Image (cartoon, rainbow, N blue to C red):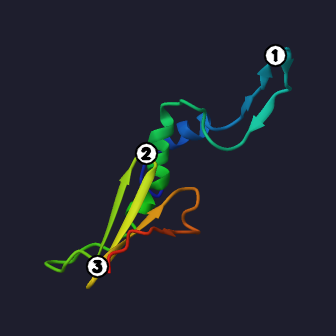
């Protein structure tokens, strides 16, 4: 968040929301002890989509920017939790799909290559 120049108050608030969380499992007549949560965000939390967009925003920056009138060689598309990198060569192109949390360790080459 700091790398994206998000104001310090918002970063601090987000840290506060995601710190010292705990949950219990309840089913039938059983209730577990409190279990600390040290990753993720609560299911259904309205902040989750905003935080995901911030978390995955580096993916959109992967494609090289076009200079002047040169033809487009790379394009990144992102929508909700899906991101795709389109690489365009002189004889066609390939669509590389990226799904977090696999990124940045792995890219999966799709079968949608044009040659």
Q: Closer to the camera, 68 or 89?
A: 89
Circle 3 packing at 10 Å, graded few (<14), some (14-19), many (20+), is few
Secondary element under disc 2, as helix, strand or loop, is loop
Query: Quick one: quadrant of the C terminus?
Result: bottom left
**Residue 96 position in % (x across, y down):** 43, 68
To which residue does mark 2 refer? Answer: 7
Question: Which mark is first along the chain, 2 or 1?
Answer: 2
Residue 43 percent coordinates (x, y): 58, 32
Q: Is residue 100 visible?
A: yes
Query: Which of the marked residues, 1 or 3, is nearer the chain's N terminus?
Result: 1
Kindly state the secondary structure of the residue where label 1 is placed: loop
Residue placed at 58% from the left, 61% from the top? 102
Residue 71 sits in which quadrant? bottom left
Position of 14 with respect to 88 (left or right) is right
Left or right placement of residue 56 versus residue 91 in this view? right
Q: Nearer the viewer, residue 91 or 81?
A: 91
State yes or no: discs 1 and 2 in contact (Cβ < 8 Å). Answer: no
Q: Which residue is mark 1?
A: 28
Name, please, the residue furthest toward the bottom.
Answer: 90
Q: CA distance from mark 1 to mark 2?
A: 45 Å
- Residue 92 shows which numbered tag? 3
Q: CA distance from mark 1 to mark 3?
A: 58 Å
| Residue plotted at (85% across, 25% down) | 32
Q: Horizontal and vertical percent for residue 106?
A: 56, 69
Of labels 3 and 2, the one closer to you: 3
Seen at 55% across and 39% down, the residue is 14
Q: Percent position (x, y) of residue 47?
A: 49, 35
């Amino acid at each position: 968040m700091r790398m994206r120049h998000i104001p310090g108050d918002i970063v601090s608030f987000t840290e506060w929301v995601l710190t010292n969380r705990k949950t219990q499992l309840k089913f039938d007549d059983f209730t577990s002890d409190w279990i600390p949560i040290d990753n993720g965000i609560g299911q259904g939390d309205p902040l989750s989509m905003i935080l995901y967009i911030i978390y995955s925003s580096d993916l959109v920056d992967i494609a090289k920017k076009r200079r002047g009138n040169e033809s487009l060689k790379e394009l990144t598309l992102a929508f909700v939790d899906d991101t795709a990198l389109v690489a365009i060569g002189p004889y066609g192109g390939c669509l590389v799909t990226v799904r977090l949390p696999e990124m940045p360790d792995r890219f999966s080459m799709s079968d949608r290559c044009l040659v």
